[in-house]
Image (spheres, rainbow, N blue to C red):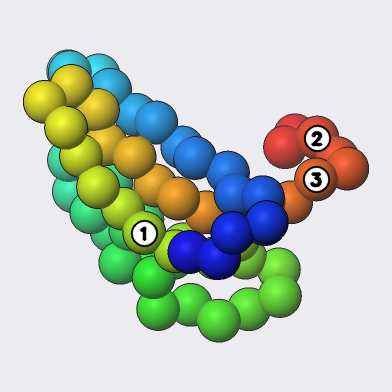
């Protein structure tokens, strides 16, 4: 990861993923974002986890709302 550049970090609770049965969806999201190269889809640079959360380091898209 380059210094002097902004990134977005998505933090998701492992507890919530399990409670909502979203384990496969999270793995699928990671796989898709990692291999997709499209100007309209945010880039995934890295993913990691700790005991409570899964983190996804993504391209920062400033200047707008997510929805």
Q: CA distance from mark 2 to mark 3?
A: 8 Å
Query: Residue 63: image x %, image y %?
Result: 88, 43
Residue 18 visible at all: no
Q: Which percent across, then down, holds residue 13?
A: 28, 22
Numbered disc in front, either 2 or 1 = 1
Give the side of residue 15 with respect to residue 38, left or right: left
Q: Nearer the viewer, residue 35 or 49?
A: 49
* Mark 1, secondary structure of its residue: strand
Give the percent coordinates (x, y) of residue 30. Answer: 33, 58
Q: Are marks 2 and 1 in contact (CB under 8 Å)?
A: no
Which structural element holds mark 2?
loop
Question: Which quadrant of the figure has residue 53?
Answer: top left
- Asked if labels 3 and 1 touch by Cβ distance under 8 angstroms, the answer is no
Q: Residue at x 39, y 70 (%)?
A: 34
Q: Secondary structure at mark 3?
A: loop
> For this view, does 58 lie left or right of residue 6?
left
Q: In this picture, is 35 found above or below 18?
A: below
Alpha carbon separation for disc pair 2 and 1: 23 Å
Which residue corresponds to the image point at 72% horizontal and 37% vertical from the top-left? 66
Tag 1: Cα neighbours inside 10 Å, few (<14), some, or many (≥20)?
few
Disc 1 to disc 3, C-alpha distance: 19 Å
Ranked by sequence position, the earlier of labels 2 and 1 is 1
Left or right: 36 in relation to 21: right
In the rendering, which numbered label is found on residue 46? 1
The residue labelled by disc 2 is: 65
- In the foreground, 1 or 62: 1
Residue 22 numbered tag: none
Looking at the image, which residue is at 60% across and 49% down?
7
- Residue for point 39% across, 47% down: 56
The numbered mark, 1 or 3, whose residue comes first in the sequence reads 1
Q: Residue furthest front?
A: 3
What residue does disc 3 label?
62
């Amino acid at each position: 990861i380059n210094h002097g550049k902004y990134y977005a970090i998505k933090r998701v609770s492992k507890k919530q993923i399990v409670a909502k049965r979203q384990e496969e969806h999270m793995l699928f999201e990671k796989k898709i974002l990692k291999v997709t190269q499209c100007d309209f889809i945010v880039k995934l640079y890295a993913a990691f986890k700790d005991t409570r959360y899964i983190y996804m380091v993504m391209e920062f898209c400033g200047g707008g709302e997510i929805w």
